[in-house]
Image (spheres, helix red, strand yellow):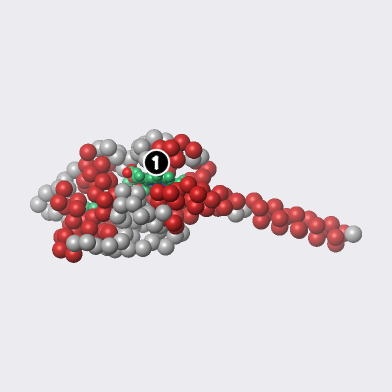
Amino acid sequence: MKLLSWKTATAVLALSLGAGLPSAWADAQQLATTVCVACHGEGGHSVVPTFPNLAGQQQDYLAKQLKDFIDGKRKNEVMAPTIAELKSGDVPGLAAYYAGQKPAPGKVEDAKLAEAGKKLYEDGNTTSGVPACVGCHQPNGVGNTRYPRLAGQHQAYTIQQIGDFKSGTRANDKGRVMRAVAERITEDEMKAVAEYLAGL
Ligand code: HEC
Ligand code: HEC
């Protein structure tokens, strides 16, 4: 009798753990594969160049961006309807889901342009005062817990974001760090660095 009730208790505990613990993860996966997939693609591999790849993006950065969208610190018309439905409780699971997907390199279309972009990425532009991107975004653009991954991103999206930081349309960078970088970059430099990053 005693043994049976212990067994029952264990079974109930196992069941509730089974249903409870992974449910946040299951919710995130459900959201990702039914809602986000329409724009960000399967596993965060977007096929539209203005929709960012999310696969393998830094988890902390993903969480910050989603929070910034929810709080209205970062605004985008295309993301707005999704954000209106999103709860802050969904953020950690979604960030973990996309950070856990395997990233894939994009395609370099202009090798010479990419070469110029690599130089800007690694050395900056000492004449105009653009700092080297590598100091924050890390070798090969992989990012870290403080800075986003840029490797393998669509050229069009990267160009758009640098332009948005430059114009101030995007202003959710703490301490203006990216705006200070972007204000010195020329259009040609944006294209070059985006071309380089796409191929990583
Ligand atoms: C209708 C299309 C659409 C849907 C659906 C959508 N997104 Fe987006 N998402 C975008 C666009 C476009 C951007 C770029 C916004 C910008 O330029 O600032 C973006 C940006 C993002 C970013 C910032 C990426 C970065 O590198 O800074 C994250 C994170 C993100 N979306 C997550 C999600 C998640 C999670 C979902 C599902 C819950 C979702 N999105 C649904 C279109 C969409
Ligand atoms: C001092 C550190 C620093 C340097 C140097 C720097 N960045 Fe950034 N960058 C950041 C931070 C921080 C963010 C994220 C801002 C936020 O929280 O939204 C960012 C965001 C970005 C984004 C947006 C990524 C996305 O997924 O939306 C792009 C693109 C970018 N940086 C490109 C560059 C390029 C190109 C250079 C070199 C010319 C560069 N950065 C140099 C700190 C830096």
Camera sees residue 186 = yes
Q: Which residue is mark 1?
A: 79
In the image, 5 versus 20, the foreground residue is: 20
In the image, what residue occupies the spot 44% across and 60% down? 101
Q: Mark 1: which amino acid? A: Met
Secondary element type, mark 1: loop
In the image, 67 versus 76, the foreground residue is: 76
Q: Is residue 13 above or below residue 176?
A: below
| Left or right placement of residue 141 versus residue 58 in this view | left
Q: Is residue 91 above or below residue 136?
A: above
Looking at this rendering, what residue extends furthest in the left direction?
Answer: 127
* Horizontal and vertical percent position of residue 175: 29, 41
| Left or right placement of residue 194 versus residue 76 in this view | left
For the N terminus, the quadrant is bottom right
* Horizontal and vertical percent position of residue 77: 36, 37
* Horizontal and vertical percent position of residue 107: 27, 62
For the C terminus, the quadrant is bottom left
In the image, what residue occupies the spot 31% across and 56% down? 153
Q: Quadrant of residue 118?
A: bottom left
In the image, what residue occupies the spot 29% across and 40% down? 170
| Left or right placement of residue 154 versus residue 128 in this view | right
Is the shortest distance between ligand 1 and the CB of mark 1 under 8 Å? yes
Camera sees residue 62 = no
In the image, what residue occupies the spot 24% across and 49% down? 159
Say few, some or many: other residues with alpha carbon within 10 Å of mark 1 (under 14 / 14 to 19 / 20 or more): few
